[in-house]
Structure formats: C-alpha cells, structure tokens
Amino acid sequence: MSEMQNNRRHQAQKELGLDNTEEELQIEQSIQKEELRQMEKQLRRMEIEQSSSYRTVLSIAKWMDKFCLDPIIGFFMPGFGDALTSVFAVPFIYVAACKVRSLPLTLAVIFNILRDVALGLIPFYIGDIIDFCNRAYLQNCKLIVGFVEDDQEVINEVNRKAVWTGIMIILFCVIIYYLVKLVVYVGSVISNFFNGLFAAF
C-alpha cells in the first residue's frame, strides 16, 4: 500500500515539475563541482599571471630570443656565453615546477634549455649561427603560457611526450659533456698553435 502511495506521489511530483530524483541531485552536484573547479582554476591562473616570476619569464623570452641577446652573447663569448645565458633559464624551471606544478612541463623546459646549450657549444661559430634559429626561450615561454591558459592542445602534446623528453634529457647531458670536452680540446689546440707561432718570432 505504502509503495503505491510513493509511486503516486512521485508521479504527481513529476507532473507538477517537483520531482527531485537522486539522479537529478547528482547531476546538480556535479555541475556545482565543475563550476567550483573552473573558478579555482581561474583564480590560480590569475595568481600565476600576476606573479613576478611569470612576468620575469615573459621578459627574459623577449630579450633573449626576440631581441637575439642569447646568440649575440654566445657569439662574443664562445662556450662561456652559453653557460652564462643558461642561468636565465632558471625562472622558467621555477615557474614550471613550483607555480604550474607540472612534471611533464618541467621536463620539456629542461630539454629545450639543454638542447639550446648543446647547439651553442658546437665550435667554429656553427653553434652560434644555429642559435639564431633555435628560440628555446620563446619555445619554453609558449609552453608555460599554454599550461597557464589551459590550452589543451599544448598540455596534451607535452604530457604525451613526457617519457621521451626524460630520455632525451639524459642523452643531451651526455652530448653536452662531450661537446665541452671538444671545446676545451679545440681551445687548447688553438692556444698551442699561437704560442708556437709567437715563440718562433
């Protein structure tokens, strides 16, 4: 009897538009959770964009790559210049690791930095010429901005390549080690050549 009454009550509520079933409540709760999540995401984005470290990243990318300061320093200070300019990459790593808090993004940023250093270390100014085309700071800036602005295309691409990026980081560390040895060797050969030349006079 009571079951029949419940069914009639539900039917009457449905006809009056008052039927608040459990399914509808769950949908409503999930909508509220999604709205809350989007609001939190928006607040987090604003917090990152207003931080001094994020603004520093944008500024460094502009000066080092748009105004070509990175290849110019590398050209006038071969070898040492590349080590010096790589210091400016620290804010990028900080923002990726501590502000955005994404391991795949941090790996991608480190990989771009190491690749830039490796290319810059190629002797006889070949690396410096390549450095004009390889805009590592702008690449990293684009990745970070993509994550902050919730660009799903950028995020999915970086996440998909995370394991491969980790492997490439190890590979480029080895490459840089041998390139440094090569630069030191070439430097000593040139130095010995000029010392012998001047000693002859």
Image: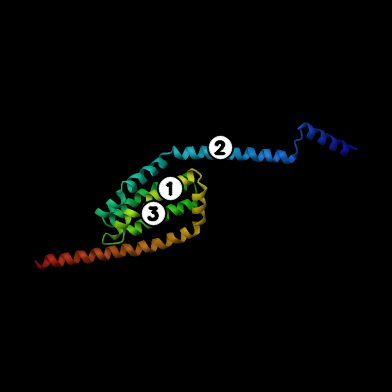
Q: How far apart are marks 3 and 2 (CA)?
A: 33 Å
Residue of label 1: 142
Image coordinates for residue 114, horizontal then vertical, percent? 38, 57
Residue of label 2: 39
- 181 or 19, which is in the foreground? 19
Q: How crowded is mark 1: few (under 14 residues within 10 Å), some or many (20 or more)?
A: some
- Describe residue 34's horizontal placement relative to residue 180 as left or right: right
Image coordinates for residue 22, horizontal then vertical, percent? 74, 40
Relative to 173, does residue 48 appear above or below in the rendering?
A: above
Residue drawn where x is 45% and y is 54% of the image: 108
Residue furthest to the left: 201
Upstream in the sequence, badge 1 or badge 3? 3
- Describe residue 191's horizontal placement relative to residue 139 as left or right: left
Mark 1: which amino acid?
A: Lys
- 153 or 166, which is in the foreground? 153
- Residue 113, label in figure: 3
Mark 3: which amino acid?
A: Ile
Q: What element carries label 2?
A: helix
Residue furthest to the top: 16
- The reply to whether discs 1 and 2 touch (Cβ–Cβ < 8 Å) is no
Q: Which of labels 1 and 2 is toward the front?
A: 1
Residue drawn where x is 12% and y is 66% of the image: 199
Residue furthest to the front: 15
Mark 2: which amino acid?
A: Met
Q: What element carries label 1?
A: helix
- Describe residue 121's horizontal placement relative to residue 157 as left or right: left
Image coordinates for residue 132, horizontal then vertical, percent? 31, 53
Residue drawn where x is 35% and y is 48% of the image: 88
Q: What element carries label 3?
A: helix
